[in-house]
Amino acid sequence: MNEPLFEIKEEIKEKNYGKFVITPLEQGYGDTLGNALRRVLLTSLSGAAITSVRIAGVKHQFSTLKGMKEDVVEFLLNLKKVKFSYSGEKPVKASLSVKGAGEVKAKDIKVPANCKIANPEFILAIINKGSKLEAEMEIAAGSGYSPAEERSTGTIGLIPLDASFSPITRVNYKVEETRVGRLTNFDKLNFEIWTDGTIDPKNALLSAAKILISYFNQIVSPKKVVKEEKVKDDGLGIVGKLSVEEIGLPTRVANALAKAGYETVEGLVKAKKEDLVKVRNLGEKSLKIITVALAEKGVNWGITLK
């Protein structure tokens, strides 16, 4: 088979929409390329979304907030629809603080300089005169769909959200017959992409093609797969990932632990008593407080106290 030679023409170029014509393709390759690109576009491109939120005065998602027209569930659903441009590896913090009557919009969310809101005029809620809406949230980058259950911590007031990271809202393709000279058995692929405004449709198409290339390269020139050794389960589960601030410790104790490098439950449980008593602002009384806090989370610390 000859090396493929075809053209890609961008027929329509808009902020959230692009139409491309790819032709001439060998018979059958219209569907082959169209289906492969469509699947990758819808599932594998990276985007950003709010993954958790903490609302002042709200303990769980089935609450109501005085002075806000929407209930908390409606507000959370609206937060899921806010679109962000962010490609960092680590999650970032964002905040919302609005007082007085009127509409609360996505642009009211204060985000870091490396994070931008694609739909700033989107309405999140309506609050009454004399009311206020304050919230802290976390924005993370990812691909595909991530259910809230994956980030459930059990921390009162911290509400995990389902996150749809994909910047692609819709993809459609159609294959037609086309002529090359006297031959009529070639394909013309009409390809349409709708985005959420955080990515250019053409760049999205190129990114999808690069992802497919990386998979095919692994077939042609396979890289050796290094098997990772299984990490021994410490039995802590998701609790081990909690920060020391999240287990109900007094601020003084939590700050002292964090400054000493014991930032998570996992790191704290592995610590030795003789090392902890050397930490500034910690003593036997503080160790007893830590023991109680860990026990409430179902963690047996294993350190003997007087």
Image (tube, grey):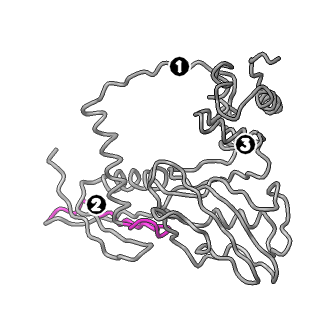
Asked if marks 3 and 2 touch (Cβ < 8 Å), the reply is no
Give the image location of residue 253, x and y in percent. 72, 38
Which segment is the magenta one? 182-201
Helix, strand or loop at label 1? It is: loop
For mark 1, what is the residue?
230
Question: How far apart are the alpha carbons under marks 1 and 2?
Answer: 49 Å
Marks 1 and 3, how far apart at CA: 37 Å
The three-letter code of the residue at mark 2 reads Asp
Say if residue 285 shows up in the picture: yes
Residue drawn at (63%, 22%) of the image:
275
Q: Is residue 29 left or right of residue 149?
A: left
The amino acid type, in three-letter code, at marker 1 is Lys
Q: Which residue is mark 3?
A: 252
* Distance in Å between CA atoms under marks 3 and 2: 69 Å
- Determine whether, in the image, residue 62 is placed left or right of residue 257: right
Crowd tier of the residue under label 3, counting other residues whose Cα lies within 10 Å: few below 14, some 14–19, many 20 or above: few
Q: Quadrant of the C terminus?
A: top right
Q: Amino acid at mark 3?
A: Arg
